[in-house]
Amino acid sequence: MSTTNIVEALAADGDTTAVQVEGGQYLIAVNGSFGGGTMQLKANVGVCSGVPITGAAYTAEGAEVVWLPPCTVFFSMSGSTTPVVNAAISELSTKLER
């Protein structure tokens, strides 16, 4: 099990650094000042980049459990003014084996 932290002070709008996830069930947690904006977890999967993850959009502090494929993920802030948001991604279970 591993935890990947994405901690950045974003300007009005922007993206965090993308991190690799192995796939499986993950806890996504965010806190901080959202500056009136929305922070959305997005994934780069194959040729599809910046795909919004359903159930992982935040306008205030919160946490969700999501299933992710092996991919890179990042948070994207939009509609905000001077946000400072912390985000953590923690693996809860390993990927499904076939």
Image (cartoon, grey):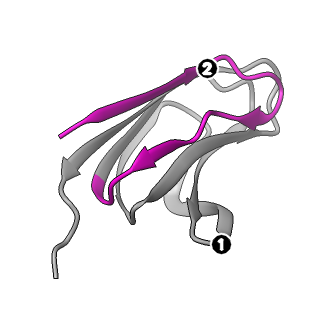
Where is 57 relative to 50, above or below? above
Judged left or right of residue 88, residue 92 is left
For the C terminus, the image quarter is bottom left
The residue indicated by pointer 1 is 47
Considering the image in quadrants, where does the N terminus appear? top left
Residue closest to the eye, 49 or 12? 49
| SS at badge 1 | loop
- Residue at position x 61%, y 34% in the image: 17
Occupied quadrant, residue 44: bottom right
Count of numbered marks: 2
Q: Which residues are magenta?
A: 1-25
Badge 1 crowding class, 10 Å Cα cut-off, few under 14, some 14 to 19, many 20 or more, is: few
Upstream in sequence: badge 1 or badge 2: 2
Give the residue at x 24% y 36%.
2
Q: Which residue occupies the foreground of this view, 71 or 8? A: 71
- Per the image, the residue denoted by label 2 is 8
Whether the residues at callouts 1 and 2 have beta carbons within 8 Å, the answer is: no
Q: CA distance from mark 1 to mark 2?
A: 26 Å
Choose top left, top right, bottom left or bottom right for residue 3. Answer: top left
**Label 2 amino acid?**
Glu
Q: Residue at x 62, y 38 (%)?
A: 59
